[in-house]
């Protein structure tokens, strides 16, 4: 625990911070106390006050979404966090968010009534509005959801190009009263495999703090610095965040076509 806390302090995580974590337990382990010790250390690092946010997204949408029971597909730490007392979960059929701490209620309430997945005023954006930080532990920028928030702030031409047919269709879910309903995903986030270019830009500009969490390399940054950097990159080129043309990505050619329409 002490070592993990030292790792977090070295990354600049301080009392009252609000932090969005993307993580790979496989990269962090082995740790004395196991994965629960990592979550304990994060909560301890930001106490008193502070808010911890994690994704609880789904890879597939066949089953109706149930806010109390649908598992997270974002790794072991997120699934254990989801089951903790005091952790709030947002009601979004594909991009549900988990939050614990002083602003958790406000952050998860951003998703009620079928609002945008990772867009303006989504839970991740609300964390940015609060001066929050992003912490990547054992994962790269291709897992950094705040880049999608920045795409939404810029208004990328491909924001209505659905990730896949599955994500373009209506999705069933149970509302807070337990009533089965269906909704379509507004501004479904697209491909994130090209987001490594944002890391290069932020590193060049001295906006990343490197360190480690357990055995994993880790990076911390201010969400507002990330959003500003991405908006600058997109102003230079609307296709800046997309995969190279010959990559074989099934999504990015559709996004390029949407960009060409507004060029
Ligand atoms: Zn792509």
Image (cartoon, grey):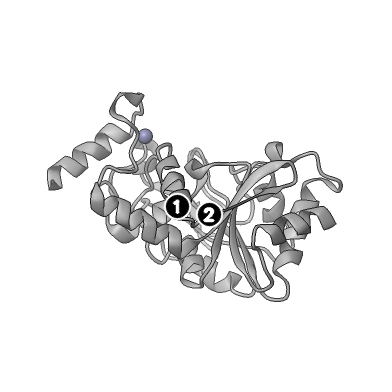
Q: Within 10 Å of the Cα at label 2, are there few (<14), some (14-19), or many (20+) other Cα atoms? A: many
Q: Residue 152, position in %: x, y?
A: 33, 57
**Label pair 1/2, CB-CB below 8 angstroms:** yes
Q: CA distance from mark 1 to mark 2?
A: 6 Å
- Residue 182 visible? The answer is no
The residue located at (66%, 63%) in the rendering is 13
Judge by depth and name the residue closer to the eye, 57 or 260.
Answer: 260
Residue name at image x 51 percent, y 69 percent: 109
Residue depicted at 31% across the width and 51% down the height: 233
Question: Compared with residue 18, is residue 262 higher up or lower down, i.e. above or below?
Answer: above
Residue 52, by quadrant, is bottom right
Say whether residue 51 is visible.
yes
Residue 175: mark? none
For marks 1 and 2 on the same chain, the one whose residue lies earlier in the sequence: 1
Q: Which residue is identified by label 1?
A: 202
- Of residues 27 and 72, the one nearer the viewer is 27
Rendered-image quarter of ligand 1: top left
* Residue underneath mark 2: 208
């Amino acid at each position: 625990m002490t070592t993990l806390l030292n790792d977090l302090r070295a990354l600049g995580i301080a009392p009252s911070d609000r932090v969005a974590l993307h993580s790979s337990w496989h990269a962090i382990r082995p740790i004395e106390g196991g994965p629960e010790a990592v979550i304990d250390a994060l909560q301890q690092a930001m106490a008193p006050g502070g808010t911890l946010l994690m994704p609880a997204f789904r890879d597939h949408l066949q089953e109706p979404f149930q806010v109390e029971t649908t598992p997270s597909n974002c790794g072991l730490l997120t699934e254990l966090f989801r089951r903790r007392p005091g952790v709030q979960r947002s009601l979004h059929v594909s991009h549900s968010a988990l939050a614990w701490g002083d602003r958790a209620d406000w952050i998860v309430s951003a998703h009620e009534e079928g609002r945008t997945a990772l867009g303006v005023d989504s839970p991740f954006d609300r964390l940015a509005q609060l001066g929050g930080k992003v912490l990547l532990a054992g994962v790269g920028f291709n897992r950094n959801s705040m880049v999608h928030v920045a795409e939404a702030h810029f208004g990328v031409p491909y924001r209505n190009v659905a990730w896949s047919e599955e994500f373009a269709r209506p999705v069933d879910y149970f509302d807070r009263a337990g009533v089965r309903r269906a909704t379509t995903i507004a501004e479904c986030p697209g491909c994130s495999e090209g987001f490594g270019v944002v890391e290069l830009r932020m590193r060049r500009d001295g906006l990343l703090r490197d360190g480690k969490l357990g055995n994993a390399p880790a990076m911390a940054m201010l969400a507002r610095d990330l959003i500003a950097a991405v908006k600058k990159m997109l102003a230079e080129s609307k296709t800046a965040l997309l995969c190279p043309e010959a990559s074989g990505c099934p999504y990015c050619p559709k996004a390029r076509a949407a960009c060409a329409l507004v060029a």
